[in-house]
Image: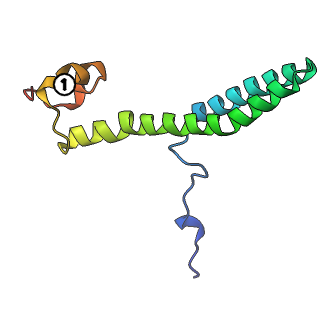
Amino acid sequence: MGVSQGNALSTFSYSPFHPGWISAQIVFISLVVSVMMMVYVNGGQMEKAERLYARTRWLIPLLWVLLMAYVFLKDLYLPYNILAGEIMWPKNLEWLANWLDYARYIPDGYF
């Protein structure tokens, strides 16, 4: 009997932290920028198309990274650490906990 590596490999071929809506956002933004560039080029406004291309080449990835950092902090890091008790929520920021919907992670009688 030989040892098979096939059973040891994960059945997931994608990252579970990369949901489909992120891909949909990237495709939608790319489509919008492409259409805008096509309109500029067909309208003879090559300078505008080049400026749009130059800006979106670094701006869209930067905005995506900032959005993912925000999602990571707001939806993963803070709720887990509040629930685990590693982050003590200050009493004067109770309104912020309610606004961000973190109050459900804070134990009863905490405030």
Residue at 22 percent across and 38 percent down: it is: 83
Q: Position of residue 41 (x, y in %)?
A: 89, 24
Residue drawn at the location 74% of the way across and 36% of the way down: 54
Q: Which residue is mark 1?
A: 93
| Image quarter of the N terminus | bottom right
From this view, report whether residue 102 is shown above or below residue 19: above
Secondary structure of residue under mark 1? helix
Q: Give the farthest residue toward the left.
A: 109
Residue 103 placement: quadrant: top left
Task: From the top left corner, tell me how far across and down residue 4 is, in percent.
Answer: 58, 74
Task: Name the residue at 14% across, 24% down.
Answer: 92
Q: Quadrant of residue 57?
A: top right
Residue positioned 23% across, 31% down in the render: 105
> x, y percentage for residue 111?
9, 25
Return the x and y of residue 96 as percentages of the image width and height. 25, 22
Q: Identify which amino acid the numbered label 1 is placed on.
A: Leu
